[in-house]
Amino acid sequence: MTPQLLNKAQILTIYIGESDRWRGKPLYAAILELLKKEGIAGATVTRGVAGFGAHSRIHSAAILRLSEDLPLIIQVIDSPDHIARATELVSPMVREGIITLQDIQVIRYTHRYLNPLPADRLVEEVMTTEVNVLTEEMSIAEAWQKMLTLLVKAMPVVDSEGKVVGMLTDEDLLERAGLQQRLSVAMNLEKPILAEELAYLQKSTLTVGQVMSKPPITVKVKDSLGLAASRMSQHGIKRLPVVDEHGKLVGVISRVDILRLVAEITPTKVKQPIKAGRTVEDIMSPKIPFVKRDDDLSVIIERMLENGLHRVIVVGDDGKAMGLISDSDVVARIQPTQRRKILSALLGKTRLQYSDITAADLMSPGVLAVYRETSLLEAAKQMMDQKRKWLVVIDEKGLPIGLVDRQILLAALSSG
C-alpha cells in the first residue's frame, strides 16, 4: 500500500458462507492466499454470529449449531487499480454470495514495520530545555539582531509570566515587517548583519508582538512524540515550543531532534516488507530543478522561481548531480555591489540579464545521493550523520530522479 492510498482508496467487501470451498480448500482461505500472492495491501475475514443468505436459511453461532454454515465477510482495502485486479480474480471464485465496492478515504495507514518513529516516547525526553526567547514589547530590530547572533530562523515569544504567546520567524519579518531580505541569506554573509536592512528596522516602530505568528502552535511536555511530529508535519514547521500545564515555556522540540532519534534506530533491525512502500522513492518530490554547470546566474534564478524552491541541483555533462545551489549561496558568493539587484531578482521583482557568473562558481560541491530503494530509516541516518537538509534520489545509472528534504522525511516517518 503506497502513500497515494491516503488520497484515494476503495474497499471491496465479499460475503460468503463458512462452508464454501474452492479446489478443496475453504473459500476464504483460498481468497486470502490469492490476494496475498497478488500483492494486495491486506484483507480481513470476519465471522458472523448469525445471518441468512439467498436460500433464506437462518444460520446461527448458537452452541447447538456450530456446524451450520455461518456467514463470513472478507474486506479488502487498497488503491483502485489494485482493487480492480482483486475483483477480477475473486469474482469467479464466489459462486454464491455478494461482492460490493465502495470509495473510501484512508486517513492513516501504518504498522510497526512502516512506522519506525517511537511515537509513544514523551516530548520531554527529546526536547531542548535551554531556550532563547523574545518578548512582545521588543523592537523588531532588536529581535532580528538576536536571531542573527544566535543563527536561528524562529524564536518563541513569551509574556511576563513566561507563557508562549507567539513565534517570530524570518518569514514574519519578510512578510509583515517589510524586510526585503531572507534571514537565511543574511546568516551566510561574511558580516552577520546587513547594514541597510538593520537601519530600516531600527527606524520601524513595529514590535515583535505586532508581527509575530499567533496563536502559537505548541505541544505539552507530557505529549507524545507522535503528536509533536504530526503537528510539525501538518503545519509545515521545523520546531515547536514545549509548554507545561499552565502554558509556560519549558523547552523546544525540533524536526532535527525527532529525526536524530529515528536515525539512532538500526535499519537492519527493522524487517521491512517489500510491499510496505517505505523507501525514498515513495516520498520524494519528482520535481527536480536543475541547471548545468555552465549555466549563468540568470538561468539559476529563473529555475528557482519556476519551481518555487530556494535551491537547484547542478548536473554535469553526464547528467549526474555534482552540487547544490541555494538562494543563500547566490547572495553570499557575489560582489556586495550586485547583491541588491540579485535580491530583487530572487523575489521576482526584476528579471536578471545574462551574467558571467556560472553555476560552477556558486555551487556547494557534492550532494548526499541515495538510491531509490533506500529505506527511510537509512535516509534519516545519513542526513543526520552528514548534517544535510536535502538528499538527491538517484536511479541505477546515478541520475537524479527526485528530492527529499527533512520536512518530507519527518512527515513520512510520523504518518507511517
Image: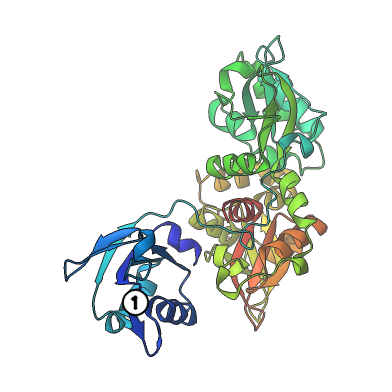
- Foreground residue, 27 or 251? 27
> In the image, is residue 142 above or below residue 409?
above
Q: Residue 389 in the image: x percent, y percent?
A: 71, 54
| Other residues around mark 1 within 10 Å, as few (<14) / some (14–19) / many (≥20) | some
**Which x, y percent locates residue 7?**
41, 57
Residue 175 location (% of width, % of height): 54, 31
Q: How is the image coloured?
A: rainbow
Up-down: is 264 above or below 233? Answer: below
Amino acid at circle 1: Ser
Q: Nearer the viewer, residue 225 or 358?
A: 225
In the foreground, 68 or 367: 68
Q: Is residue 210 left or right of residue 38?
A: right
Image position, residue 261 (x, y; %): 77, 50
Q: In which quarter of the view is residue 294 placed?
A: bottom right
Q: Residue at x 48, y 69 (%)?
A: 41
Question: Residue pushed farthest top?
Answer: 160
Q: Is the C terminus in the top left, top right, bottom left or bottom right quadrant?
A: bottom right
Is residue 194 shown to the viewer in this render? Answer: no
Compared to 130, does 326 lie above or below? below
Identify which residue is drawn at 42% across, 81% down. Answer: 30
Q: How many marks?
A: 1
Name which quarter of the figure residue 81 lies in: bottom left
The single residue placed furthest to the bottom in the displayed view is 23
Asked where in the image residue 379 lies, by quadrant, the reply is bottom right
- Residue at image mark 1: 19
Looking at the rendered structure, the secondary structure element under dot 1 is loop
Query: At 39% from the left edge and 60% from the top edge, which residue is drawn?
Result: 63
Q: Residue furthest front?
A: 64
Is residue 341 at least partly visible in the picture? yes
Q: Nearer the viewer, residue 281 or 197?
A: 281
